């Protein structure tokens, strides 16, 4: 009976050595996905804040500043080159309405670099001009 336990210990060590790398990859994947999910939510909220300001004030500089403020927690931060506003200003139309779209393109770097360098995420907000 004692001999059976000794051989089982060796088998357990081999099984453990085979399973641990899979568990580590799973935990790293969960952490990376969770961070990407959080960054995507931040981008969506920042785009919504920026487009709201653009639609109400028709000020692209203020809209970009609102995006940067709403996404201040992101590292690296958002630059003006990553923010696209279309059309560039809200036109004044008689009887009609136009929407303005604000898009943020953000290259999110991975925390660990285990799955590559990063992933490109996008946040978009659309609102009718002049409320």
Image (cartoon, grey):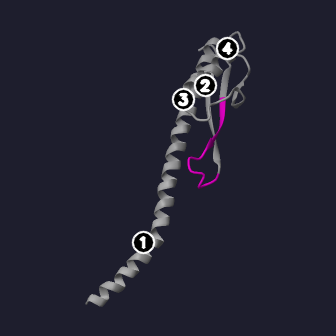
Circle 2 residue: 68
Q: Position of residue 112 (x, y in %)?
A: 56, 50
What residue do we see at 48% from left, 60% from top? 24
Sequence order check: which comes first, mark 4 or mark 1? 1
Q: Quadrant of residue 71?
A: top right
Q: Position of residue 60 (x, y in %)?
A: 69, 18
SS of the residue under disc 2: helix
Sequence order check: which comes first, mark 4 or mark 3? 3
The front one of 86 and 97 is 86
What residue do we see at 49% from left, 49% from top? 31
User: How far apart, in angstroms, are the residues tagged by discs 2 and 1?
Assistant: 47 Å
Q: Residues within 10 Å of mark 1 (few under 14, many from 20)?
A: few
Circle 4 residue: 59
The quarter of the rendered structure image containing the C terminus is top right
Sequence order check: which comes first, mark 2 or mark 4? 4
Residue span colored magenta: 103-116
Q: Quadrant of residue 6?
A: bottom left
Q: Position of residue 99 (x, y in %)?
A: 66, 22
- Is 26 left, or right, of 46 in this rendering? left
Circle 3 residue: 45
Label 3 near label 4: C-beta < 8 Å? no
Q: Quadrant of residue 13?
A: bottom left
Sequence order check: which comes first, mark 2 or mark 1? 1
**Which label belongs to residue 16?**
1
> Above or below — where is 47 with respect to 94?
below
The quarter of the rendered structure image containing the N terminus is bottom left
User: How far apart, in angstroms, are the residues tagged by discs 4 and 1?
Assistant: 60 Å
Q: Is residue 53 magenta?
A: no
């Amino acid at each position: 009976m004692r001999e059976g336990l000794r051989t089982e210990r060796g088998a357990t060590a081999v099984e453990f050595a085979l399973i641990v790398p899979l568990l580590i990859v799973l935990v790293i994947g969960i952490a990376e996905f969770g961070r990407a999910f959080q960054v995507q939510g931040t981008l969506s909220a920042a785009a919504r804040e920026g487009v709201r300001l653009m639609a109400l004030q028709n000020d692209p500089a203020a809209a970009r500043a609102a995006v940067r403020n709403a996404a201040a927690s992101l590292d690296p931060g958002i630059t003006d080159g990553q923010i696209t506003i279309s059309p560039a200003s809200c036109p004044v139309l008689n009887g009609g309405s136009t929407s303005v779209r604000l898009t943020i393109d953000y290259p999110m770097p991975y925390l660990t670099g285990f799955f590559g360098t990063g992933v490109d995420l996008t946040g978009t907000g659309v609102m009718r001009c002049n409320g």
